[in-house]
Amino acid sequence: MTSRITLGPPLVGAPMSTDAPFSLAFGERHGEGARQVTVLAVVADEVTADLFRRVLSRDRLLLAGDMAEGIALAEAEAPEIVFVDVGVADGAGLALVHHIKVVAAGSTVFALAGADVVAAGAHAVALGAAGLFILPLGGDEVLNAVHAVRARLVERAARGQLLADLRAHTRASEWLRRMVEIADAPDWEMIAAEVADVLAEATGASGAIVYVARDERDGELAQRAATAAIEAPLFGTETELLERARREQLTAVRLTARKVTVGLALLPPAPPKSNEGHAASLDGIVRLLATQAATSFALRLERERASSVALMKDPSSSAYSFAYYVDVAGREIDRARRYSRRFSIATIVLGVPGEDGAVSLANPADSPRAAELGDKLLSAVTDIDVVARIDENEFHLLLPETEGLGAHAVRRRILAKLASGNERRLIPRGVLVGMATFPHDGQNLAQLLRVARRRADSAADSIVHSFASADPSLAELVSGRVRNVGSAASDLFAARPFSLARSDAAALAVTAVTEAMRGGPVLVVAAHHSGVTIGGAIRTLLGAGREGVTVHTIDTSSSPGAISTEALAVFAEHGAYAMVGKVDGNNVRGCHAADPFFVDLVAERIGRAAGVRVLG
């Protein structure tokens, strides 16, 4: 029987032979799935070393025959269990116990001692060894020692995992609480910023880019928060953003609730060594957070819809409210900027016509058309256009995908709808209309609204109100019976008189058309016959035609009094211009203006003089 001293837990057990039965016990203890440990044995005796080899065949075994090698292996490999023969190097193994506890502080050290150096073994325990075994060893002693340490390590790991899981659940509960509360945030950007922060914390990423679709009919996601230092577009469909994430190796988190994706988050790769509990995968808590974020976004959207249903429609007409108009216009501006598109807006104001035809903005509610204007506007536009009522006398109109020439056509269509049945005026009495087109007239909604309102106000003083006849002919436009020609210099739309040589008048007309073509498509209407100079100059300028330029040079010689009349109307993306004058020898005397209503009048009268309709 081998003598044995046990000073550390748990090293109690009967000695066992090292023949065949030992392998059975080893297999029972070292079953499938058992945690492998690293064992260092510093022994000089080859028999003892061979015992370790046979007993610990399924663990990682390191063997050292002297002190130097033992210290080097302990420092390099950080073994979890160390067996030291205190008798190596004539008893220097005792010091080795102390050194190993320094270089591999987390290891469990067992001392081995022959019968002649038992006292040294006892000193080894005093220096920190967990137990003392008397040589020669039995296989069961080694297995018991390793099994006890393995059990403690497994228990420690399990305890650490439980603590980690508890911390993870605590963090997850806090993240979920934040996700639930974001639905009450005051705006979409704050909601998206909180989602970005939580997802970044949960995945260990440096930040996130969050996209949200506020309108399921839109099909696009808009960037609402960016906390990651990565290049990302402001808009994009889900397919486009997922493809970008694939190319740039970003993590894409769908914000999905009930199989409906309401948003998307893009995250840069997490650092190789993230903090404990930060998982880069989309499993578990990240999926739950994404679902809760989508739910909060959906709740916020439904709340906005519920609160805005009553505000969407104007209660006294068929038009929309101004708040809804601003929201739709904002989305239209976003699309127009991204895809280089154009759109237009209109401001329609009811006024009170005076005795001279001019329109006053005083007491607009007295106008008999105030109650029916919304319905008439709706009948004059397409299904994608948006009519909104601002107050009792003002309406706004949004015209998606409508460029400048289209806006002029809509303006004429609106005025025709608002005219009474027997009214032949191009501008109905008591109605003011102003148009503005993106991007020529403004880069944002505020600028466009100011331009449209200024043009509507200018319509009150348009020269068309000052003609003696309510339905003047082309000849009457230059008959001299025009009042208020040449108002304040600050009025950009006021008519100005001119007296020019015929060649200079032709040069002015050519300059006007040339400038108009710089902005895109152009519509030109000019009088032309043998006695007229301007029409010929325009035909010479344009030759066989220009792309995007529509020209009507019309023979007006058959119209009484029009034989000596020079007339030109130009409609461009960024404005309108007309000039009309009477030929007097080698001179032309008349007026010109950038007033779109006057341009309409000149173009329509040129066509009427020849029995041709030139304006749609």
Image (cartoon, rainbow, N blue to C red):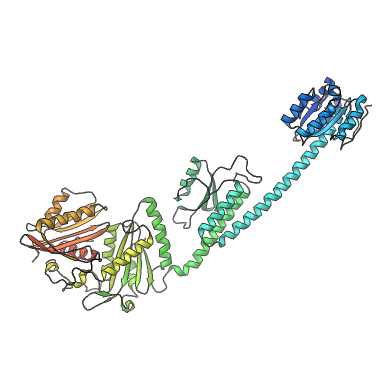
Q: Is residue 370 left or right of residue 154?
A: left
Q: Residue furthest left?
A: 585
The x, y position of residue 69, in whole percent, is 76, 24
Q: 315 above or below 18?
A: below
Position above or below: 424 against 72: below
x 18%, y 54%: residue = 511
Q: Residue furthest top?
A: 46
Q: Which quarter of the image is occupied by the C terminus?
A: bottom left
- Would you say residue 379 is visible in this rendering? no
Q: Quadrant of residue 257?
A: bottom right
- Res. 603 image quadrant: bottom left
* Residue 342 rendering spot, x and y as whole percentages: 33, 55
Q: Residue at x 77, y 42 (%)?
A: 156
Figure quadrant of the N terminus: top right
Q: Residue 91 sits in which quadrant? A: top right
Residue 301 percent across, percent down from the top left? 51, 61
Nearest the viewer among 556 and 456 is: 456
Q: Is 278 left or right of 221, judged from the image as shown?
A: right
Q: How many marks?
A: 0
Above-or-below relation of 304 to 55: below
In this orientation, does residue 342 appear?
yes
Residue at x-position 41% and y-position 61%? 328
